[in-house]
Image: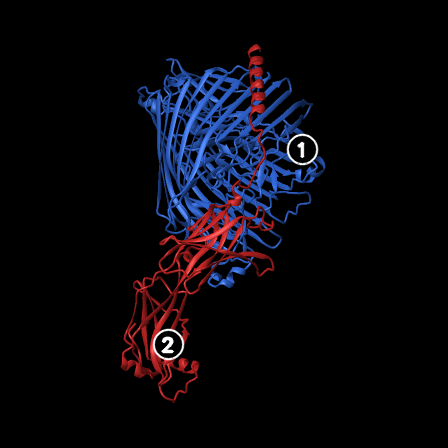
Chain colours: A blue, B red
Amino acid sequence: MFNILRPHLKHLGTLALLQLVLSGLSVDAQAQRTSLSGLITSANSGNLMVGATVVLDDLSGERRAVATGTEGLFRFSRVHPGEHVLTVSFIGFTSWVDTLQIAPATDQFLEIRLFEQETELEELVVETVRTVADRYIAGLETIAPSALSRIPMPDVTYDLAGYLLTLPGFVSTGDRGGQLFVRGGTPTQNLVLLDGIPIYQPFHIVGFYSAFPADIISYSDVYAGGFGARYGGRISSVIDIISRNGNKKKVEGAATLAPFLTSLRVELPVSDDDVSLTVSLRESVIERVAPELLGQELPFHFGDLFVKLHGFMTPTSSISFTGLRTFDKGNILALESGTDLDVRSSSWKNQAYGIRYLFLPPDYPAMFEFAAHFSGMESEFRLTEEEFRSSQVQSFGLTMQFHYLLGDTQLHFGIFGNTNIFDYRLGANQRAQRSSVTSGGGFADTQFILNDVLRIEPGIRFESFSQGTSMSVGPRLRAILLPWGSRSRHQFSAAWGRYHQQIIGLNNEQDVSEVFTIWASSPQAQAVPEATHVIAGWKGRLFPWLELSAEGYRKWMKNLAFPVFSESVDGSTRFTRVKGDARGVDVKLDVNLPSLYMGASYGLAEVTYTRESGVGRTILIPGVVTTAVIQEDARTFFPPHDRRHQLNVLAQYEWGRNKLGMRWQFGSGLPFTKVNGYYQSLDSDKLTAPQGLTQSGSTFVSRSTLYGERLPNYHRFDVSYERRFTFERIDATLQLGVINVLDRENIFSYNIFTGDRVNQLPFIPSVGLKIELP
Amino acid sequence: MKRQKHISFVFGAWCIALLSVLGCENVISPLTDDADKVFAIHGFLDMAADTQFVRVSALRSAVLAEEPGLEDVVVQSVDQNTLEVVEWSDSVIELDDGTEGILFFGLFTPISDRTYELQVLKDGILVATANTTLPETPPYFASVPTGDTLQFSQSVVVEGINGRPFEVAVQYEVSRPSENPSETVSIEYEQDGSNTLGGWQFEVFLKRDQFSVLRQVDWPILGPQLELRRVSAIVSLKSEEWDNASSPDNFENAHGFFGSIGRFELPWILAPADVGKIGYVDRQEPF
């Protein structure tokens, strides 16, 4: 029977090392106690080989296959004693093949090193064992670092953010501000994890960049919805990034220089074969270069520092430390040259640290994982030099996970505890508000392989909080159908789940230029934001070079906080509760030829919010998060991130040492509210006598139908060309690119009070150089 | 390789077609076309006045723009019970900041419990409205007075209202001994009172008020007693629009504030013994 590691094993914390391929044959007692496991590394760099295919053939003709997990480990349990052929393969490396005699009732452990192939990558022919990436799971997109290099960037580095925006259903309100909306969800409803550590504001102020450069990423699992019970605390999406462990054999590094960004990455073995240290540092330079290069101000300053220390304590256990710091500061409106960064400026800083320990018991088909983290963010929105709002959030978390493989059933469960501390001020003269909430809970994810055709994965997550709400229970269910077994060219998958979010982010969505977000726990005695996801889709490989997928989804959301329009020009933001309904269809096409990649994705979506009754509950009023009652008409409207049509077209052509890439993005206009005009509103308390009619009043705005109009469509065409040079000891890559080739004036913000229009990035030529120590 | 070229060609052609078809429109018009049919209206109807005032202004197209004039604009009110129409006149007034505003005034006295619709017509077409219903006369009762000397008082309960009325006074109609013409003395009551089941009550300090009455009519404390003709509470009630001033729902194509104030006299009869205890001669007549 042919089988492989199921893709989602990866998501269960480097689970790939555990996968026992489920044979379905009767297993005798000896086989039950016989296992084969191993560690796959690169002979050239010492790097762990994540996703390498490991195939075990026995003489009876039975074939079992797994892929290595994030720790480069694999494991077969219930192996029949006797002679087997073990094959390990990975793209770009020479396959390792050996014949093994496996003794009864033993647990054999192998350390295997793969050598890089001399031949060009595109000439490789890899055995058509289906790999993890081929598996289709509803809502999930697994992103390999190589995919990130298909996106033209304004510099020679690549970044996760650029790629995410090519995915259907991922909407950004502009190329600045770092806000990402996933299938109707808002940025604060996305859970972004780096090695299991939550990052509160993971995107930089310039939309091309996140805190995650491609060079540090091993892979990313991006769930647009329907995520499993392992994840919780957010109701829209999960972006789970696993970082690389670094070279344990030799010093490796790279440095880049470009008008947007400079970067430096170093990987060095601390202890040969066992411990590696990776450091990545990036800092923007565009704010210094833009006035001369582009003739306009781009006052965005940002950067990040990533550090990872990884080591093997024994061949079956490892420990790692991950640290990340980011900073962003800029005036998102950037109206004119000489813009003062202390006026209407947004800034935020993340710092996140985590430690993770993995242990694979030699004699049991199980894995244990312990993780602890600290994550914090400080943000500030400075309206003037004196007036500002600030917010700070800190979280501490502990997680213990256990993974068991019990024949055709896999069980993954864990317990966790978190403490979150919030602190914010809504004005220079406002009192600081401090609060905290502690939670604890558990989850269980199971996997039942019913047969070669159908697999179902039920799960449940529960979490209890020290204040604010009763225990939340979130059931999850996923099904994967391969109509013609494991070699099926067509795959179907569906997912369903209920999600809760006790820690909420309050952001004035109505003002795209104000990214300031307050994190707080849900007010006492109020229902927390909640969502139900349903996803169903199909993925088919119509030809060996052509893959097509389509996925329909729906998210029902309730108890969401949405700002109330203030009629007053300088009114403060208040929020009421709304229900949300996001639905859509995402279609993706991939053409993979030896030197040509082309991809197109289209997303059709509709997001509606409904404010239910005439009385809304305020959950935030200046100075305090509390409950109050305000009058609001019941209404249904399209929120400002409702992008109805989204189209992305990507192409990359490689010849020799050259690479040409281009991307075209199209997005239909986002909703906005038209204005009737402005008037002086008089204080009604002074209107009890005719003399009150002479007061001059305050300026108010009269708005038309809520979000009844659409902004102009958005589109941008980017091109980049790269040429790689190889010298004796270094490799160099020269990049030439143009962002917004057509110099399209895409609107970012329109100030209805002043009439000022701010466009997104203009035509930006770039040249970049990357030097690598291979 | 041939297939690759073919795909590239198709792909390129597709992109060019898309680029040429999509996304050409790139202007934004933030103002609605009907902006000149929306108005700001501020004012109230007062039962105690025979002339009513509202301030009407057209919307400005920008925050700092000048307020447009109100050419071809007519303001009128309609009594929704009788459908009687009153056309209002306009006048220019100087505002507190030195600029000018346009005030409309209508010559009529609104009646309690009636609904009035203020209509703004532009070029003869009704474009904006605001309406208000005046409060109705509240039920009330006065309890038996209690206490001695300065604390001699009685509770008055105004039913059907939620909280203190906008203005409260106690009015005494008195006359000097052997004189027919009476004088009316009104004493403002600023006390908070207290909410009761279904209403609001306050305490009328009858004896203490008597000193105020004597002072106001300039009558000696130790002189002959004044005659009490009538005692009543004067209560001013705001219409419900005041409760919802921040998000009014009584406008069509208009913003601002439009409400009404009901002024009510709530009389009661004091027992002769109580009148004597206060220090008046009882000359009350049934009402």
* Res B180 → quadrant: bottom left
Circle nearer the viewer, 2 or 1: 2
Question: Where is residue B54 drawn, in percent x and y?
Answer: 49, 57
Instruction: Give the side of residue A486 with respect to residue A155, left or right.
Output: left
Q: Chain for mark 1? A: A
Instruction: Give the side of residue B92 with respect to residue A490, left or right.
Output: right
* Label 1 SS: loop
Query: Quadrant where the N terminus of chain A lies?
Result: top left
Q: Which residue is mark 1?
A: A258
Crowd around label 1: few <14 · some 14–19 · many ≥20 (10 Å)? many
* Res A12 → quadrant: top left
The one of A485 and A12 positioned closer to us in this rendering: A485
Relative to A239, does residue B185 appear above or below in the rendering? below
Relative to A77, does residue A370 appear above or below in the rendering? below
Instruction: Give the side of residue A466 with respect to residue A574, left or right.
Output: left
Question: Where is residue B114 drawn, in percent x and y?
Answer: 36, 57
Crowd around label 2: few <14 · some 14–19 · many ≥20 (10 Å)? many
Q: Is residue B233 visible in the rendered structure shown here?
A: yes
Question: Where is residue A139 drawn, in percent x and y?
Answer: 43, 30
Relative to B117, does residue B282 appear above or below in the rendering? below
The one of A731 and A78 positioned closer to us in this rendering: A731
Relative to A635, does residue A220 appear above or below in the rendering? above
Query: Identity of the amino acid at label 1?
Result: Ala
